[in-house]
Amino acid sequence: MYGGPGVKTSKDLPIPDTMKAWVLGNPGELKLTQKPVPAPKRAEVLVRIDAVAICATDLEIIDHGSPALIEGGKPFNKNFTPGHEYMGTVAALGPGVDEYKIGQRVTVEIHAGCGQCKRCREGMYTSCHNYGLNYGDVDKGHRANGFTTDGGFCEYQVNNINTLVAIPDAMSDEEATLVVTAGTAMYGLTELGGLVAGESVVVTGPGPIGLLGVAVAKALGAHPVILTGTRDNRLAIGRELGADHVINVRNENVVEAVKRLNGGKGVDYVVECSGAPNAVNEAVYMVNRGGKVCLAAFPHAETSVDVAHIVRNNIYLYGIRGEGKSATHRAEAFMSQKRFDATKIHTHTFALDDLPTAIRYAKDRVDDAIKVVVKARGVAAHRVAAE
Ligand SMILES: [Zn+2]
Ligand SMILES: [Zn+2]
């Protein structure tokens, strides 16, 4: 019988004792197993996962481990379930929780933080000082589902109420999985100053965060918004999401092109989403004096940076981790008001059982895949592949 001390459930949404869950074995190896359905504690709810999007960071974790941190180390062979961009239905309430109702649709953000360190107290819970310290004698209660605690490639997961974002009925499951991606772009723009109306923005790299970065910057009133990248099909989607100009970096000198498009002085902000080896230097050459650069990608190698140019020109560099300061709520507000159509980056849906195929589509960009979603129920539960 499912439950726990003080846990509220409803007969309308019966909860099994066990669930399907993918777990990470050796690097690159996912196994479908059964796990007990977890029980929510104080300030937590149980979410029935209805859809989960695959993120480049999931691919990184599955193959290389980092930035996941389980029991103080890499996440391999620890019965760990990855996946972090999920949405679903509230299925059980922890003791004392009255902020949400059973049956309510929600999307989730990743990081709950510990709630007790300096950064969590400032709303910077993605840079919690107790990251990954949620086990054994060092337990500080930190949660980042799919990074330091079990994630969403399964049927149910517990979430702190601070990580939930209520969504309207009109928002599809697939669209709701994209709120956290838009929220990451929103957090980046918030950290750069937030008020970008009438200011110029370059977004480098048309991956999911970059494309939704264009959409969020445009919705915030930025002008012009310029997107750079190497693939014309992705740049075309960027135009549909609000880019005033796109630059294919294979065809022209990107720094010169940005300056030409913005009156010669460079732009006010760059949101760097490509992780390319030369991206930081190009970004600092694209901004005008006193401009700001947000670094939102995880490059694989160290890069050399033109520090003298940064200092002489009073340029600010910001590292951005995830979706802090409740940015997902602001992103969801734009999406529910239909200020942009995030579903333009959703390309494929698979059943949860077909996760390895879905991951292959995302990793190899099969059939021009951008955002690939898996679903445990509904139409996708029965192996309907690409839409
Ligand atoms: Zn992600
Ligand atoms: Zn903390």
Image: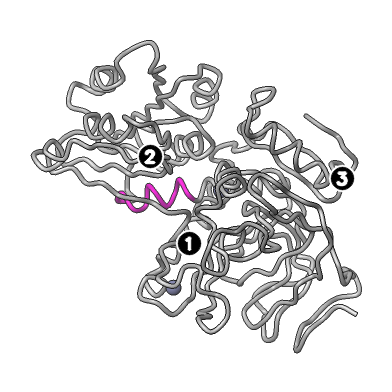
Residue type at mark 2 is Ala
Residue 326's disc number: 1
Mark 1, residues whose alpha carbon is within 10 Å: few (<14), some, or many (≥20)?
many
Q: Is residue 84 visible?
A: yes
Residue 306 location, x and y as percent?
A: 18, 35
Residue 268 location, x and y as percent?
A: 25, 37
Q: Circle 1 — which element?
A: loop
Q: Give the distance between the C-alpha atoms of the residues marked 1 and 2, in whole angstroms.
A: 30 Å
Color theme of the render: one colour
Residue type at mark 3 is Ala
Q: Circle 3 — which element?
A: helix
Residue at point 48% right, 30% down? 206
Residue that mark 2 sits on:
301
Q: Is residue 230 above or below residue 282?
A: above
**Magenta segment main secondary structure:** helix
Instruction: Indicate yes or no: mark 2 CB to ligand 1 under 8 Å.
Output: no
Residue at point 54% right, 57% down? 68
Residue type at mark 1 is Ser
Q: Earlier in the sequence, mark 1 or mark 2?
A: 2
Instruction: Indicate yes or no: mark 1 CB to ligand 2 under 8 Å.
Output: no
Quadrant of the image for the N terminus? bottom right
Instruction: Indicate yes or no: mark 3 CB to ligand 1 under 8 Å.
Output: no
Residue that mark 3 sits on:
381
Q: Earlier in the sequence, mark 2 or mark 3?
A: 2
Q: Give the distance between the C-alpha atoms of the residues marked 2 and 3, in whole angstroms.
A: 39 Å
Residue at point 37% right, 37% down? 272
Residue 312 is left or right of residue 40, and the answer is: left
Span colored in magenta? 184-193
